[in-house]
Amino acid sequence: MFCDEALDAVEPIAAGELTPDGRIADHLATCPNCAAALDSARRLERMLQARPAPRPAAQFTSRTLARVRRARWRNEQFLDVGFNVAIGAIVLAVIGGIWMLLHRSGLAAVSSDAMDLFGSGMMTMVRRVAPSLPLYGAASAVLATALVLWWWAERDATL
Ligand SMILES: [Zn+2]
């Protein structure tokens, strides 16, 4: 039995992970160096166990959750913006297409009867719809205002 073998066992014994068997127990009983090493290891172990574990700050959980929520909200806002931009682009493309159809500037080469029919049909529709346009505009404005208010409310709720 050598000291280094006993010293290897000192820390597990002090931590309570190892029960010293006969040989090591005998050595620890007879070798003052190893006994002192076990003694200091046990003292260190007791000190570590007596030391209070640092507690998280009182509002750690709520603050962390708030931060997670905010990050998620930003993510959703980003997606919303992307979605709105895509919808806006589609609406613009549709409006541009209708405008081009009405003015038929881009369709000068394709002057078939079908196109004329379609164009005049569109003109009739537009003429019929035109008087109601202010109403549609007002309805859209009300809807937009409601959406903005809802967006603000939602934002305050998630913050
Ligand atoms: Zn020894």
Image (tube, grey):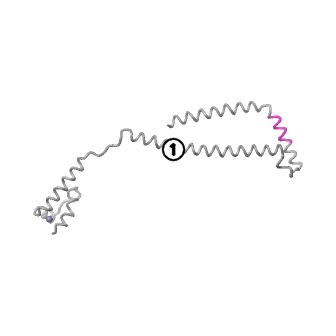
Quadrant of the rendered image containing residue 132: top right
- Region of the chain picked out in magenta, as a range: 120-129
Q: For the point 52% across and 42% down, which residue is it?
A: 73
Q: Give the crowd class for mark 1: few <14, some 14-19, many >=20 residues within 10 Å.
A: few
Q: Judge left or right: residue 110 versus residue 56.
A: right
The spot of residue 87 in percent (x, y) is 67, 44
Q: Main secondary structure of the magenta part?
A: helix
Q: Residue furthest front?
A: 105
Q: For the point 16% across and 69% down, which residue is it?
A: 2
Q: Secondary structure at mark 1?
A: helix
Q: Is residue 129 above or below residue 16?
A: above
The spot of residue 19 in percent (x, y) is 19, 59
Q: Is residue 67 above or below residue 141?
A: below
Mark 1 lies on residue: 72
Q: Residue furthest left?
A: 30
The spot of residue 12 in percent (x, y) is 23, 59
* Most foreground residue, 32 or 17: 32
